Image: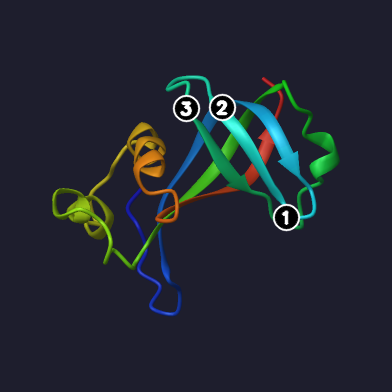
Amino acid sequence: MSASLNVESDWNFRLLEKRLVTVKTKVESARKIAVSDVVTNLTFIVQVPEAIDMEMLKPDTEYLFNLKVYTSKNVDDVKDDLVNFFEAVDIDQSMDDFIRAYWAYPSKVRFELVEAEEP
């Protein structure tokens, strides 16, 4: 699924994908959880919308998360060799690529929970 360009947002929607993760910690007041991806074994932050009950998400538990991925439109501080990764919204990149990009540029990649289910 390719990205949509919403000119009113500072973010480009890039991908919607299910991912097996383990919840590590959660901060209910900020509506964010830290998860560890089962495939890459990398940890990243997921934003949880108000419509999802955070009580149901238990630390040290595996879930199948349906995630939306966004990348920032502002790439001013991104290295030249990675600018194309963030700007080329018509190219399909894998979830693994976005998780790795998050580690290099955490303020440039955003994950949002759409749905959670226990596998």
Q: In this view, does 114 lie to the left or right of 44?
A: right
The furthest residue to the left? 81
Separation (CA) of disc 1 from disc 3: 21 Å
From the image, tell me which residue sits under label 3: 42
Amino acid type at mark 1: Ala
Quote the CA–CA distance across marks 3 and 2.
5 Å
Considering the numbered disc 3 on the image, is that residue within a helix, a strand or a loop? loop
In this picture, residue 70 sits left or right of residue 76: right
- Kindly identify the amino acid type of the residue bearing the numbered disc 2: Ser
Q: Position of residue 32 (x, y in %)?
A: 67, 48
Q: What element carries label 1?
A: loop
Identify the image quadrant of residue 21.
top right
Residue 59 tag number: none
Residue 6 point in image, percent of width and height:
40, 73
Labelled pair 3, 2 in contact (Cβ < 8 Å): yes
Q: Tag 2 or tag 1, which sits nearer the N-term?
A: 1
Residue with the mark numbered 2: 36
Q: Nearer the viewer, residue 36 or 52?
A: 36
| Of callouts 1 and 3, the N-terminal one | 1
Per the image, label 2 sits on a secondary structure element best described as strand
Q: In which quarter of the image is residue 3?
A: bottom left
Q: Mark 1 points at which residue?
A: 30
Crowdedness near tag 2: few (<14), some (14–19) or many (≥20) residues, C-alpha within 10 Å: some
Residue 44 appears at what percent x and percent y?
A: 52, 37
* Amino acid of disc 3: Leu
* x and y percentages locating residue 46 in the rendered image: 59, 44
Say how many tags the image has: 3
Spatial CA distance of label 1 from label 2 is: 18 Å
